[in-house]
Image: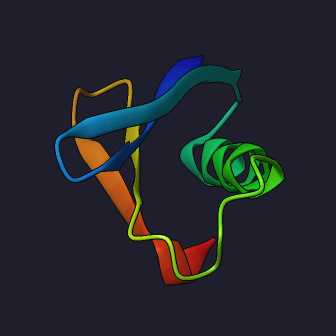
Amino acid sequence: MEYIVHISRGSDNVDSHTVEADSDPQAFDLAIAWAASLGLAADDDVVLAIKLPSGALKIFVRKDF
């Protein structure tokens, strides 16, 4: 399944990506690894949002990744 991943800072788009995963937990791990690879500062006030196949969003704040 494809999961759309989006990082934003307030109303500004930082980056977007699509991950391919067999389950939600796997998608979360892949999305967090991708977000961590961007080299954002630890205190950067960004949010990671993952759109699930159901249409729901799973949100991670910066301290989570």
Up the image or down, 18 lies above or below 38; here it is above
Q: Is residue 58 or residue 7 the one in the foreground?
A: 7
Q: Is residue 18 or residue 9 the one in the foreground?
A: 9
Q: Quadrant of the N terminus?
A: top right
Q: Is residue 35 or residue 57 the one in the foreground?
A: 35
For the point 71% across and 29% down, the residue is 21
Q: Is residue 24 or residue 57 the one in the foreground?
A: 57
Q: Position of residue 7 (x, y in %)?
A: 44, 43
Number of marks in the rendered image: 0
**Quadrant of the rendered structure where residue 23 is?**
top right
Q: How is the image coloured?
A: rainbow
Q: Position of residue 25 (x, y in %)?
A: 62, 54
Up the image or down, 62 lies above or below 25; here it is below
Up the image or down, 21 lies above or below 60; here it is above
For the point 79% across and 53% down, the residue is 33
Q: Quadrant of the C terminus?
A: bottom right
For the point 59% across and 22% down, the residue is 17
**Quadrant of the rendered structure where residue 54 is?**
top left
Q: Position of residue 10 (x, y in %)?
A: 21, 53
For the point 53% across and 83% down, the residue is 63
Q: Is residue 9 left or right of residue 25?
A: left
Q: Is residue 64 left or right of residue 47?
A: right
Q: Position of residue 52 (x, y in %)?
A: 38, 33
